[in-house]
Image (cartoon, rainbow, N blue to C red):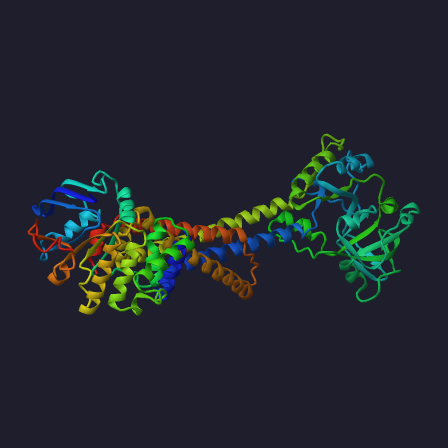
C-alpha cells in the first residue's frame, strides 16, 4: 500500500504539468464548494450573532396582543386580570433547567415625553426594574452608579438613562445629578448605561420593526419600588430571562411564557405572554440563505463531475502508455488485484491531492471574498475534511474503469508492445 | 522432471480462420537442464514460451510444472506460479524506467509480500551476484544494454525460482555483452537453475546443452551436439 502511494507520487511528479491539469477540475470544484460553504457558515454565524446577540442569551418574554407586543402607553389604564409577577412565579421560572437568571419590569411607552428644563424628548420607553435587570440584560454603567437597595427601600425618585436618551435630553451636558420631569414627577439622574454588545437587529418584518423601533429614542429606568409614584401598583410586567446557552433560548422562552400565562386570571383577555424566539428567527433566515446557497453547491458539484471525467480520461491514457509495464508486472507475478490497487491508488492520490489543493484555494478564495465584499466567511473544518474524502472517492470511482482495464490486460499482448 | 508438456496444441482465431500455431508439441525438461529453443519468427516459439511461462493456456494438451498440473489453475494461482517458480528475461529488458536497479529487482519481492528490509537485502545480494553491486542506485537510462539485462536477470532470480525463461536475451546486445551474458547463464545453470532460452542465433544456442528446433509449430530434438558436457 505504502509502496503504491510512493509509486503514485513518483508518477505524478514525473508528469507534473499533466497531473496538475488533470487535477485542475477537482481543484476548481472543491475550491468553489469550500468557498461557498465558508460563505454560508460565515453568514449563518453573522445572522445568529446579530439577531441573537453574541453570547448574551437573553430572551424577552413580553405581553403581546394579536401577535404584536402589548404596549401600555403613559396615560393608559392597566388591563385587568394580568397581575404583576410574584416572587413565587419568579422562583418557578428560576427552577427551569434552561434558565440562569430572571428579571421582571413594568414598562410604559412615553409618547408625551419627559422634560429637562426646556428640552423635551418624546417616544421613550420607561421601565420600572428590579436589581438584577442590568446584569441580566447585559448593560454596563457608562457613568454614575446603578440602583442600590436603599433606592428601593426609600422609594427614591432616581433615574438611570441609556446613552441614547442621554444624548437626546442633555446633548453634551453631563446628565448626572440633573432633574428630569416624568409625567409631572421630578427624578434625579444617577447613572447612564449602555448595552454591552451593540445589538443591531435585522429588521425583516413589521413585527421586528415594532419590537425595535420602540427603543429608538432611548430608555429610562427607575426603581420598581418608585413605579407607583408615577403610575400604579401591580401593573403587568414583562420578563427577561437569561438562558444557560444559546441553544436553550427557544425552550427557556417557551417554558417561561407558559408559567407566566398560567398566572393570568382574566380568561377572556387576548393578552398573553409570548417569548421572542430570536433563535427561531435566526434559524429561518439561515434556512433561507442555506437554500439559495445549496444550489450553488450543486453547480460546483458539476465541476467535480467534469473533473472526475478528466481524471478517468487521463488514467485511460496512462494505462495505454504503460501497457508494457503492466505486462511485465503481470509476467513477474503481479496479480490482477495488485495492478488494480496500483492504478486505483494512483487515481485516488491524484484526486486527493487535487482536493487538498482545492481546499487551500477555496480557503484563499473565501478570504478574498471577505476582503472584497465584506461578507463574513468561516472555513469549516468538517467541510474541508469531507471535501478531501470526497475527492478521494471521486478518484476511486472514476479511476475504476481504467484500473479494471489495466488489471485485465493480457500480459502477452502487453509484452509484445514496445 | 521439472517441465512436462505433452501434446500441446494452440490455435489462434483470426477473423473466421483458425490458425494452428502449435501442433502436438511435447517437451520434457529435467531439473538443471539448459535448453535452447531455436526457430525462425512465426515458428511458434514465442507462443510455446508463453505457455511454458504460464502466461498463456494451450487449446489442448497437458502441462505439469514441478509435478503440478498448471492448466487447471485459476489466474491467481498462475500469477503465484510465475512469481515463485519462474523467472523471466526479455529481449528488451522490460525494466521500469523511473525506478533504480535496486527498486526494479525489489518488485517481485513486493508482490511476494517480503518486508522492506529483507527486500533490499535480497535485491542487493541478487545484484551483487550479477556483478552490479556498484550500480544498484542507477536508473536504467544510466546503464548499458548488458548491464540492463543483468538487472533483469537479478530481478528474475531474486525470488529464487527453479526455472529461468529467457526470450531472445541477447537480441538487443552487442557480441561482447552477449558473451558475458551467456557466461552468467552458464554460471546460473551450474548453480542448478534450469534455463529455457529462445533464440534464433545459432552461436547463442550453442551455449545450451540441449537444442530444440521449432518450425511451423512442430518441434524436433537436435541430436549430436548435446550431452557432451
Q: In which quarter of the image is the C terminus of chain B?
A: bottom left
Q: Is residue A303 visible?
A: no
Q: In which quarter of the image is the N terminus of chain B?
A: top left
Q: Which residue is nearer to you in this view: B39 or A384?
A: B39
Where in the figure is residue B158, as x and y percent of width and height?
32, 54
Tell whether A355 sits left or right of A339: right
Q: Is residue B208 visible?
A: yes
Where in the figure is residue B106, as x and y percent of width and height?
35, 56
Residue found farthest to the front: B228
Q: Which residue is nearer to you in this view: A63 or B129?
A: B129
Where in the figure is residue A37, as x and y percent of width and height?
51, 54
Q: Which residue is nearer to you in this view: A169 or A331?
A: A331
Residue found farthest to the right: A154
Residue A253 occupies quadrant: top right
Q: In the rendered picture of this protein, how many numbered marks are placed on residues? A: 0
Where in the figure is residue A347, as x and y percent of width and height?
37, 54
Tell whether A80 sits left or right of B108: right
For the point 81% across and 34% down, the residue is: A88
Tell whether B166 sits left or right of B14: right
Rendered position, B114 above or below A364: above
Q: Which residue is nearer to you in this view: B36 or A300?
A: B36
For the point 48% across and 58% down, the residue is: A359
Amino acid at each position: 500500500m505504502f509502496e503504491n502511494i510512493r509509486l503514485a507520487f513518483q508518477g505524478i511528479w514525473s508528469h507534473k504539468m499533466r497531473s496538475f491539469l488533470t487535477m485542475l477540475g477537482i481543484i476548481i470544484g472543491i475550491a468553489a464548494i469550500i468557498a461557498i460553504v465558508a460563505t454560508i457558515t460565515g453568514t449563518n454565524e453573522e445572522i445568529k450573532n446579530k439577531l441573537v446577540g453574541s453570547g448574551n442569551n437573553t430572551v424577552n418574554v413580553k405581553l403581546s396582543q394579536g401577535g404584536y407586543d402589548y404596549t401600555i402607553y403613559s396615560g393608559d389604564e392597566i388591563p385587568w386580570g394580568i397581575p404583576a409577577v410574584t416572587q413565587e412565579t419568579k422562583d418557578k421560572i428560576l427552577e427551569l433547567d434552561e434558565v440562569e437568571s430572571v428579571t421582571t419590569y413594568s414598562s410604559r411607552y412615553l409618547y408625551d415625553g419627559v422634560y429637562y428644563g426646556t428640552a423635551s424628548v418624546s417616544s421613550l420607553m420607561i421601565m420600572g426594574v428590579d436589581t438584577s435587570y442590568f446584569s441580566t440584560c447585559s448593560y454596563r454603567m457608562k457613568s454614575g452608579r446603578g440602583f442600590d437597595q436603599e433606592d428601593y427601600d426609600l422609594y427614591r425618585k432616581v433615574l438611570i438613562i441609556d446613552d441614547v436618551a442621554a444624548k437626546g435630553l442633555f446633548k453634551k451636558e453631563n446628565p448626572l445629578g440633573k432633574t428630569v420631569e416624568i409625567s409631572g414627577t421630578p427624578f434625579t439622574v444617577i447613572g447612564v448605561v449602555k448595552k454591552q454588545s451593540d445589538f443591531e437587529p435585522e429588521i425583516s418584518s413589521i413585527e421586528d420593526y415594532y419590537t425595535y423601533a420602540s427603543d429608538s429614542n432611548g430608555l429610562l429606568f427607575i426603581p420598581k419600588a418608585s413605579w407607583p409614584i408615577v403610575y400604579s401598583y401591580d401593573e403587568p410586567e414583562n420578563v427577561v430571562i437569561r438562558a444557560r446557552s444559546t441553544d436553550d433560548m427557544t425552550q427557556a422562552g417557551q417554558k417561561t411564557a407558559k408559567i407566566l400565562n398560567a398566572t393570568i386570571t382574566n380568561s377572556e383577555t387576548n393578552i398573553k405572554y409570548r417569548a421572542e424566539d430570536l433563535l427561531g428567527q435566526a434559524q429561518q433566515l439561515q434556512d433561507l440563505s442555506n437554500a439559495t446557497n445549496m444550489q450553488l453547491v450543486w453547480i460546483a458539484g458539476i465541476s467535480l463531475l467534469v473533473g472526475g471525467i478528466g481524471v478517468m480520461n487521463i488514467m485511460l491514457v496512462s494505462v495505454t502508455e504503460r501497457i508494457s509495464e503492466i505486462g511485465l508486472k503481470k509476467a513477474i507475478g503481479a496479480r490482477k488485484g495488485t495492478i488494480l490497487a496500483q492504478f486505483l491508488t494512483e487515481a485516488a492520490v491524484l484526486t486527493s491531492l487535487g482536493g487538498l489543493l482545492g481546499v487551500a484555494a477555496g480557503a484563499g478564495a473565501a478570504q478574498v471574498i471577505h476582503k472584497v465584499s465584506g461578507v463574513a466567511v468561516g472555513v469549516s473544518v468538517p467541510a474541508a475534511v469531507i471535501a478531501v474524502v470526497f475527492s478521494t472517492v471521486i478518484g476511486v470511482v472514476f479511476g475504476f474503469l481504467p484500473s479494471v482495464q489495466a488489471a485485465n490486460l493480457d500480459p502477452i499482448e502487453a509484452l509484445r508492445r514496445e | 522432471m521439472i517441465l512436462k508438456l505433452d501434446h500441446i496444441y494452440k490455435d489462434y482465431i483470426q477473423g473466421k480462420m483458425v490458425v494452428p500455431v502449435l501442433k502436438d508439441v511435447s517437451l520434457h525438461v529435467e531439473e538443471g537442464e539448459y535448453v535452447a529453443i531455436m526457430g525462425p519468427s512465426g515458428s511458434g516459439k514465442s507462443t510455446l514460451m508463453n505457455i511454458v511461462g504460464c502466461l498463456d493456456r494451450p487449446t489442448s494438451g497437458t502441462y505439469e510444472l514441478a509435478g503440478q498440473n498448471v492448466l487447471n489453475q485459476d489466474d491467481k494461482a498462475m500469477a503465484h506460479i510465475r512469481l515463485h517458480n519462474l523467472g523471466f528475461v526479455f529481449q528488451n529488458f522490460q525494466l521500469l524506467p523511473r525506478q533504480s536497479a535496486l527498486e526494479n529487482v525489489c518488485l517481485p519481492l513486493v508482490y511476494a509480500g517480503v518486508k522492506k528490509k529483507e527486500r533490499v537485502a535480497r535485491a542487493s545480494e541478487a545484484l551483487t551476484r550479477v556483478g552490479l553491486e556498484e550500480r544498484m542506485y542507477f536508473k536504467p537510462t544510466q546503464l548499458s544494454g548488458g548491464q540492463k539485462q543483468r538487472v533483469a536477470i537479478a530481478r528474475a532470480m531474486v525470488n529464487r525460482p527453479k526455472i529461468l525463461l529467457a526470450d531472445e536475451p541477447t537480441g538487443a546486445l552487442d557480441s561482447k555483452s552477449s558473451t558475458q551474458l551467456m557466461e552468467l547463464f552458464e554460471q546460473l545453470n551450474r548453480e542448478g537453475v534450469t534455463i529455457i532460452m529462445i533464440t534464433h542465433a545459432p552461436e547463442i544456442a550453442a551455449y545450451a546443452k540441449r537444442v530444440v528446433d521449432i518450425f511451423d509449430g512442430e518441434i524436433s530434438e537436435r541430436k549430436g551436439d548435446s550431452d557432451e558436457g
